[in-house]
Image (cartoon, helix red, strand yellow):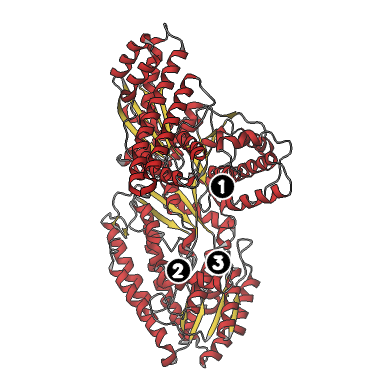
Amino acid sequence: MAEALKDRSMVLQKEMIANHFERLAQAPETGEKVVYTFVPGNLTELIRSFGALPVLPEINALQSGMRKLSGEYIAEAERAGHSEDVCTYVKCDIGMMRAGNIGPGGTKLPKPDLLLLSYTGCYTFMKWFELLREEYDCPTVMFHVPYQGDGKLEPEHREYMLRQLREQVIPALEKVTGRKYDEEKLRHHLQLSAMAEDDLVAVLQAGKTVPSPIDGYFGTVYYVGPIFSAFRGTQEGVDYYRALREEVEERSALGLGPITPEGPLEGEKYRLVVEGPPNWTHFRDFWKMFADEKAVVVASTYTKVGGTYDFGFRHDPNDPLGTMADYCSGCYTNLNLPARIDMIVRYIEEYKADGFLINSVKSCNSFSAGQLMILREVEKRTGIPGAFIESDLVDPRYFSAANIKNRLESYFQMIDARRAGRTA
Amino acid sequence: MSCVVGIDLGSTTTKAVILDGNGDVLGRGITNSRSNYDLAAAVAKTEAFINARFGLIEQRVEATETAEAVAILRRAFVMEQLLHQLRRLEVLLLEEVDKSAPPQLARPFREAIEEICRRITAEEEARFRQPALLRSDFFRDAVGSAFMRIAEQIGDPTGVSFDRLIGVYDKCIIRVENEPMDLDFRDHIGDALARVSNPRLADAVEYAVAYDLTPAATVGTGYGRARLPFPKEQIRSEILCHGLGAHAMFPGTRTVLDIGGQDTKAIQVDGAGIVTGFQMNDRCAAGCGRYLGYIADEMSLGLHELGPLAELSKRSVKINSTCTVFAGAELRERLSLGEKREDILAGLHRAIVIRAMSLLARSGGVDDEFTFTGGVAKNPAAVRAIRELIQENYGERTLNISPESIYTGALGAALFANRMVA
């Protein structure tokens, strides 16, 4: 396959990530403390305010998937007794750890000084860290975020989260890092977060332009990488999103389509909204199936798992703990089914989409449960037929390329036939 | 006459349909897909054109000859095609013997091959004079079973054994199937006409030979469609083709179920045959046509024997496994418990249809009218299970099944080709 075309922002991102992993590799020598935590509901600003470095196991797993390492890690975890039906992120992470904890970039990952479990809509997270705690024998603190089962949270839910932050999370971080909680520092990081979030939202909403200058799914998983992982609330994060926004606005002004691994996509033919995580083991092939058909994803829900900023939320330095609670509870994985349906319908309307697709992953029941109901309901409300495909996150055994390609081609041809039928 | 061609490259069989300018079917052809899609497409297309030319003969002699006379000519033609392939097989077999047989066996080995081919030829000629039961039209199936039977009779365990004979056969049959051969109408109609010695057909044959049937457009579909040497605009997904094909056969169709070799499709169409939604299996192939093929192998039955046997059942056994391989294990377990073969088979048919029902539900349910297509629609036990389960889940629905349902995808493709010409 041709070497991917790289934007300036991609080069920048690559450097940031390489530096971060280098710093992590050095942590045992430099004494920097390391906190493992999950993407949805991550408290990066708080971790950074204690001078600690975050490690995101899901990000490592998906990168291992993209680098074709996950199959062997999963096999390793299965040999250690984890069943075929366990979430493949978990097995990939455990396999990677057992194989020497060499991160996807080739540098060694340090052991955690603290496991900070933010519990947002995924029960497996809890089991995952239970397994890691067993391996690393390190302190673990759980931050329980109430699920938005009724579509909103009550003041007492928020108070419950604040109490956990004050009484458990902050004391745990103080103990591990040996530093006192510094609210000014936290405010500073939150301020940087909000700046980057503004720029990110401008990038995401560029998908409303016709033709779209971005791919709101395949391209955007790269765009959200820094803010979903270690760089929210950092100056590098602010710089990255500023550069990215400029690039995207430039493309938009010139009427250009998104950059894909095969080159710039011109002549956008289909505009889609996608629900569900991508498949990582065949990410480029999967993307190419869309790009070859000139299909652009204009918006996706998966790119909101680390925060839904496009509906107005920003981290607020004036209410440091409260804003973190609000952020965590609003992550996509913590939303109930009606809220997810509303979001997809809104995307279809506001982004002028002519199709939507659900990628149902075997690994993730939190994501997949109810997706067929979502499909029906969105079809009913928008009058647009949805496509449904099945694959997995990082287990290469569950990506059947011929079938998925066949499905997508059929779907695009169906959109054509419907358009032709309407004008006939 | 202007005509168009639709080709459906399936995982099990490849089908071709030829339409005239009015969208009426001129001919249909089918062959096994083997591992060579290009050749399978060429063979199916050739068969469809042969079929179309026989249609022309029928038209031409309608007033003077009985349909039986043309049918005899057609049987003679099919036999000529088969004997032609058999002669080629014999050449390859003898070459293979020369190359690989131990020197002391070379002569008896050659003689055994010649004997087998002589006997098959004689059997075929006898069969032509006295038509026997229906059998598979595919060369591999027809010749394979005869070869094996005769090899068993003449094989000599101490010399040219059955195993040796089958060994060379297995090598050569693949080559015969995969090399292009002269099997067209013009190649064998002369010999066929001579064999039936019916001079009253000669004029019609001449007419059919000379008739210009040049396709104005060809559209391909099916799993192997990416292999077709056509530009992209001439390729349509099988979803669209099955939707349109079913609509053409039964204009009232709103829901289509196609159970193919390796996928099951549930399709919703509007009043114009335009697909409005569809669902297919993808992470797993459980519940597809191949499921039945596997079960047939497990029970040492022909695929076409499964349905009729299951129809004898008075009490279907509940089969739990949706996994094809596990269903095989469950089958053996049930047999060992003394369950009847027909009852287990009825349960297996119901199991495959239950899987299809979940796809139908996913695609939006079963609307009236409901059309069942694909190879599995030929299976009476599958049809019965579909009928029962639709009744249970959706109430009264008109169920359409065409005897030509296996050609639905190819028909849809040909209709798309027609639109390109129009």
| SS for dot 2 | helix
Three-letter code, disc 2: Leu
| SS for dot 1 | helix
Q: Which residue is mark 1?
A: A376
Three-letter code, disc 3: Cys
As drawn, is A110 to the left or to the right of B376?
left
Q: Quadrant of the C terminus of chain A?
A: top left
Q: CA distance from mark 2 to mark 1?
A: 29 Å
Q: CA distance from mark 1 to mark 3?
A: 26 Å
What chain is tagged by disc 3? Answer: A
Three-letter code, disc 1: Arg
Residue A246 rendering spot, x and y as whole percentages: 30, 66
What chain is tagged by disc 1? Answer: A
Q: Is residue A340 above or below residue B114?
A: below
Which comes sooner in the sequence, label 2 or label 1?
Answer: 2
Residue at horizontal 37%, vertical 63%? Answer: A203
Residue B360 rendering spot, x and y as whole percentages: 58, 42
Q: Report the front residue among A163 and A7.
A: A7
Closer to viewer: mark 1 or mark 3: 3
Q: Is residue B70 above or below residue A266?
A: above
Would you say residue B177 is visible in this rendering?
Answer: yes
**Is mark 2 in CB contact (under 8 Å) with mark 1?**
no
| SS for dot 3 | loop
| Mark drawn on residue A87 | 3
**Is mark 2 in CB contact (under 8 Å) with mark 3?**
no
Question: Dividing the picture into quarters, in which one does residue B224 lie?
Answer: top left
Which comes sooner in the sequence, label 2 or label 3?
Answer: 2
Q: Report the front residue among A288 and A333.
A: A288
Counting other residues with Cα less than 10 Å from the Cα at mark 3, is it few (<14), some (14-19), or many (20 or more)?
many
Q: Report the front residue among A299 and B86.
A: B86
